[in-house]
Image (cartoon, helix red, strand yellow):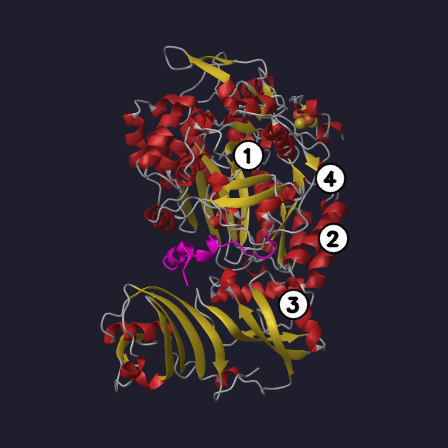
């Protein structure tokens, strides 16, 4: 019996899979790989699969993490290769670590880096320093207790922008995790509110990495 | 940087994985290296389409060929259709995302009459002219198959050709001919249709002229060229055990209706219920060997990663090697920790024991389908189940801890009387009494009986194909009678919407004149008629009126000498057999099943199956 943390990519082909569907998909992948899954004990046993910070529908990623329990002791490379062989295009395991206890703790994740490619309604000057110089950025934000106004400025750690006519690329490091989870969509919403003439017609979000204390867990 | 239209659209529709493909085991080919691109069209939404076994089989058969790429094409849900139309996006295939109008051929599977509006709507979304006669050489051929194809006259003008019967072989034959035809200089569409009309099982509607009498009944159906056979006979797979079947299937991301490995145990049914089209059109019964199925189960489980497996057939209990198969499967599923479900089992000692062995069976839903409330009416329809069967089986179930019983009936059956309708309530009451006769300590608590009725719809190729269908008012009256006859609060009653049954009845025995109505209804916004929330009965009635067609015409009783719209189709079972069965039904005489005694239905002409056991 052993636990593995896997780091994986989710590409364009598979970005619309919801979290619940993804968990079921992974169970099937592990069965297909003929790796013996570990099940929880109890009345309704379910496989031990734990996904760090589920990805929103439509978002691609280079650095997702999940933990799986296997009944047996396997070589890391073997587990990674076997699973990769059964994955459809769009998914790829890029890192693996066998763990004993909680040395890789998903609860410690507190930041994430995102890249957003945006198409603007019209070419607009995007002055990031002046946007970030606002002492507060008030937007409507969903939380457990409903939608209410919140100041997201303290939760934005960096924001860069490259621009080519009406196409811009934003790279941001923002709070993520159980403690405070900021979505890149909310940052873009704030930019639309605070930057004159800034209006997106469409954008695509990509998660580059999940961070705990400014470092990747794997 | 640019975004695809698809990305922009998918941001705002529900369940985007319905449209993106890329699932586990999807077939990937390079379209540039392919001779024939085929779009397998299922005229319903992804979750329904992907639950269909026939799709999986033909997808497999076609993609085994190096020269062919079969892709899936499903009806976009209403939100997606709206977005597609707003953005001028055409109907596309899931594998490549390419527009189907650029394909060589598209094929619809017709599983139920209520999907006809979706067929027409999908053609429209694809940019393919709705009627066969308006199509040029630059658009794909449009074909169709499936159970409704035996009488798809209502949409015949929209279909270039039908494939009748089981499709595994015939679909390859038409592809072979297609490649030959492509080589002919200056080939025409008509030429191709003439070439395939020679193949057994191919029906090209435009090669048949239909003439009508003054009263709108059919005067004659005549082939208008030598290649068209006077009667088109269905195809079957004579050696079903070795018939091609996929050893891997696509595993969807989203939740679908039947999300599990399905094992097709046998085709056909030995029983011969007189109302049941499936029971007749799939004759004769042909089985797969238990060993073949066990191997197949093993391979399918490893290739999909599914954690559930289910048997598929019209009546599991009639499988001759059932004990052997279930022994093997129970062993396999226990080892792999997966669930086994055994639908349509008749309740007896064997099946009860079986269900106790199978771990994942919930002690809730057990279903009986007596179909009629009295023994007389059950004899009329040849439903071989007695009140004693039902009561002794339910007694066994109650003692075994089951408390949820569903009883399925039909109302509006031929020769049905008030007594028969009340009989439904009486039978349910007797089941309830059986429960209370069992001592408290030997039964579980909270008995729950559900009576469910559908409305009888006379179908082509059944003993009742000539019968009159009850009007909506008559059905409502009977539903009310039944409601008031049910006395106990522990018996719940649910019933089918009479409007859907009405329309299904019209199309089931419809003729070619209906195509205008269907096209008009689609213009008037009708689609997804099988979905209660989207079914627009008023628009349908308006469309009938606009086309000057009286739908009631199709529900009337037909004379034995009347030309039926499907008389030029041969399913193997003969019209004279149906006539005999009808006569026996009038006298409430039953007919034995194929294993008890052959009744000479005609299906032995295929030279295989139960007729030669
Ligand atoms: S010919 Fe006889 S055995 Fe064969 S399907 Fe018909 S009734 Fe059954």
Q: Which residue is mark 1?
A: B146
Q: Secondary structure at mark 1?
A: loop
Q: Nearer the viewer, mark 3 or mark 4?
A: 3
Q: Residue at x 73, y 29 (%)?
A: B608
Query: At 45% across and 67% down in the image, what residue appears?
Result: A59
Contact? badges 1 and 4 (CB < 8 Å): no
Of labels 2 and 3, the one closer to you? 3
Q: What x and y, as percent, mark residue A20?
A: 49, 65
Residue B489 in view in this figure: yes
Contact between marks 2 and 1 (CB within 8 A): the answer is: no
Q: Chain of mark 1?
A: B
Q: Is residue B9 magenta?
A: yes
- Same chain for mark 2 and mark 4? The answer is yes
Along the viewing direction, whichever of B229 and B280 lies nearer the viewer = B229
Q: Secondary structure at mark 4?
A: helix
In 3D space, how far apart are the residues under numbered discs 1 and 4 (Cα atoms)?
Answer: 21 Å
Residue B611 location, x and y as percent?
Answer: 72, 27
Label ID, residue B86: none
Give me the C-alpha separation between circle 2 and circle 4: 19 Å
Identify the residue position indicated by label 2 in the image.
B327
Residue B265 image-quadrant placement: top right
């Amino acid at each position: 019996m052993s636990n593995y943390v896997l780091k994986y990519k989710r590409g364009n082909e598979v970005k619309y899979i919801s979290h619940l569907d993804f968990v079921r998909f992974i169970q099937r992948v592990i069965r297909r790989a003929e790796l013996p899954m570990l099940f929880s004990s109890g009345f309704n046993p379910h496989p031990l699969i734990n996904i760090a910070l589920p990805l929103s529908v439509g978002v691609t990623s280079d650095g997702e993490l999940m933990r799986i329990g296997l009944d047996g002791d396997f070589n890391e490379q073997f587990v990674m290769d076997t699973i990769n062989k059964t994955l459809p295009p769009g998914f790829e395991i890029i890192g693996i670590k066998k763990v004993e206890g909680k040395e890789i703790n998903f609860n410690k994740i507190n930041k994430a880096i995102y890249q957003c490619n945006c198409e603007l309604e019209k070419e607009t000057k995007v002055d990031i320093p002046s946007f970030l110089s606002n002492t507060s950025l008030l937007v409507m934000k969903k939380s457990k207790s409903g939608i209410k106004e919140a100041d997201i400025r303290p939760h934005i750690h960096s924001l860069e922008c490259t621009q080519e006519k009406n196409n811009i690329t934003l790279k941001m490091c923002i709070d993520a995790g159980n403690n405070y989870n900021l979505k890149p969509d909310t940052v873009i919403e704030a930019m639309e509110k605070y930057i004159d003439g800034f209006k997106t017609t469409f954008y695509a979000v990509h998660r580059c990495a999940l961070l705990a204390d400014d470092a990747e867990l794997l | 940087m640019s975004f695809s239209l698809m990305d922009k659209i998918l941001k705002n529709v529900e369940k985007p994985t319905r449209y993106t493909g890329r699932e586990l085991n999807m077939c990937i080919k390079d379209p540039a290296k392919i001779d024939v691109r085929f779009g397998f069209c299922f005229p319903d939404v992804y979750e329904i389409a992907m639950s269909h076994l026939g799709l999986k089989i033909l997808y497999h058969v076609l993609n085994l060929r190096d020269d062919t790429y079969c892709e899936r094409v499903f009806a976009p849900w209403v939100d997606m259709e709206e977005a597609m139309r707003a953005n001028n996006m055409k109907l596309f295939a899931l594998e490549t995302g390419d527009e189907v109008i650029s394909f060589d051929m598209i094929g619809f599977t017709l599983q139920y009459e209520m999907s006809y509006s979706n067929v027409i709507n999908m053609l429209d979304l694809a940019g393919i002219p709705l009627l066969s006669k308006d199509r040029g050489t630059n658009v794909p051929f449009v074909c169709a198959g499936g159970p409704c194809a035996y009488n798809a006259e209502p949409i015949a003008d929209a279909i270039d050709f039908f494939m009748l019967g089981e499709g595994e072989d015939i679909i390859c034959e038409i592809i072979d001919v297609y490649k030959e035809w492509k080589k002919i200089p200056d080939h025409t569409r008509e030429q191709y249709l003439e070439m395939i009309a020679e193949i057994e099982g191919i029906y090209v509607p435009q090669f048949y002229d239909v003439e009508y009498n003054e009263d709108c009944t059919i005067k004659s159906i005549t082939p208008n060229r030598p290649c068209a056979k006077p009667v088109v006979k269905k195809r079957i797979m004579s050696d079903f055990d070795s018939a091609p079947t996929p050893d891997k299937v696509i595993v969807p991301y989203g939740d679908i209706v039947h999300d599990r490995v399905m094992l097709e145990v046998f085709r056909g049914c030995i029983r011969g219920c007189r109302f049941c089209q499936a029971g007749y059109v799939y004759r004769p019964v042909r089985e797969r060997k238990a060993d073949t199925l066990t191997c197949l189960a093993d391979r399918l489980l490893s290739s999909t990663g599914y954690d559930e497996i289910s048997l598929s057939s019209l009546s599991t209990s009639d499988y001759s090697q059932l004990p052997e198969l279930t022994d093997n499967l129970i062993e396999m599923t226990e080892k792999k920790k997966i669930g086994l479900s055994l639908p349509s089992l008749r309740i007896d000692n064997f099946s009860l024991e079986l269900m106790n062995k199978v771990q994942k069976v919930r002690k809730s839903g057990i279903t009986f389908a007596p179909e009629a409330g009295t023994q007389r009416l059950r004899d009329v329809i040849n439903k071989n189940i007695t009140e004693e069967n039902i009561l002794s089986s339910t007694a066994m179930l109650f003692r075994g801890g089951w408390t949820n019983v569903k009883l399925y009936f039909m109302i509006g059956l031929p020769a049905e009387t008030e007594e028969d309708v009340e009989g439904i309530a009486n039978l349910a009451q007797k089941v309830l009494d059986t429960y209370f006769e069992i001592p408290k300590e030997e039964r579980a608590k909270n008995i729950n009986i559900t009576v469910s009725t559908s409305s009888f719809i006379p179908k082509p190729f059944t003993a009742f194909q000539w019968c009159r269908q009850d009007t909506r008012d008559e059905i409502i009256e009977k539903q009310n009678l039944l409601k008031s006859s049910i006395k106990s609060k522990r018996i719940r009653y649910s019933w089918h919407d009479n409007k859907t049954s009405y329309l299904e009845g019209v199309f089931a025995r419809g003729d070619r004149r209906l195509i205008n109505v269907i096209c008009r209804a689609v213009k008037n916004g009708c689609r997804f008629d099988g979905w209660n929330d989207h079914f627009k009965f008023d628009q349908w009635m308006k469309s009938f009126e606009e086309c000057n067609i009286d739908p009631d015409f199709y529900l009337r009783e037909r004379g034995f000498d009347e030309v039926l719209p499907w008389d030029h189709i041969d399913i193997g079972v003969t019209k004279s057999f149906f006539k005999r069965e009808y006569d026996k039904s009038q006298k409430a005489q039953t007919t034995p099943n194929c294993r008890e005694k052959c009744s000479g239905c005609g299906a032995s002409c295929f030279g295989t199956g139960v007729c030669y056991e």
